[in-house]
Amino acid sequence: QVQLVESGGGSVQAGGSLRLSCAASGNIFSVNTMDWYRQAPGKQRELVATISSGGSTNYADSVKGRFTISRDNAKNTVYLQMNSLRPEDTAVYFCRLHWQLLRAYEYWGQGTQVTVSS
């Protein structure tokens, strides 16, 4: 059984910063990818950033240059450093852990709220 626990959400004014964390525990395959998604009210869930166990990263255009994804493989933890936050970044942020080993494995965290006021 794999569990993901997110932390670090909160309320901040525009231009501020927050750092999200997502710690995974359980039976985890070492070659995996961890992502951050977000979902704003009335909108579809969207991919924000992704990082492989090897350290390769990708970002949505809307957050490039402002957000940084990183991970600590020893702790099975992924981070999202969010700088220069904007009101449109307001959403529930979810982490996702996935890998392929004979079949696809996918696990989601419970989500953490980020609210950016203008």
Image (cartoon, rainbow, N blue to C red):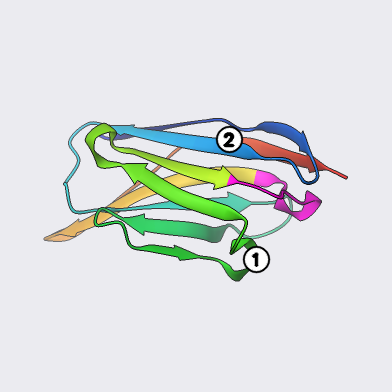
Q: Which residue is mark 1?
A: 62
> Can residue 41 be seen at all in this image of the molecule?
yes
Q: Residue at x 76, y 55 (%)?
A: 88
Q: In the visual, does 101 lie left or right of 94?
A: left
Q: Residue at x 20, y 41 (%)?
A: 28
* Residue range highlighted in magenta: 82-91
The three-letter code of the residue at mark 1 reads Ser
> Can residue 111 be seen at all in this image of the molecule?
no
Assign a secondary structure to mark 1: helix
Q: Which residue is mark 2?
A: 112
Query: In what quadrant of the picture does the N terminus appear?
Result: top left
The three-letter code of the residue at mark 2 reads Thr
Q: Residues within 10 Å of mark 1 (few under 14, many from 20)?
A: few
Estimate the x, y position of residue 43 in percent, counting from the top left: 69, 58
In the rendered picture of this protein, how many numbered marks are placed on residues? 2
Residue 90 position (above or below residue 62): above
Assign a secondary structure to mark 2: strand
Residue 114 position (above or below residue 53): above
Residue 46 position (above or below residue 40): below
Locate residue 45: give its quadrant: bottom right
**Circle nearer the viewer, 2 or 1:** 1
Most extreme residue toward the left is 102
Residue 86 among those drawn in magenta: yes
Q: Residues within 10 Å of mark 2 (few under 14, many from 20)?
A: many
Estimate the x, y position of residue 93 in percent, counting from the top left: 57, 44
Locate residue 18: give its quadrant: top right
Estimate the x, y position of residue 36 in percent, counting from the top left: 48, 51
Q: Which mark is residue 99?
A: none
Locate residue 74: give its quadrant: top left
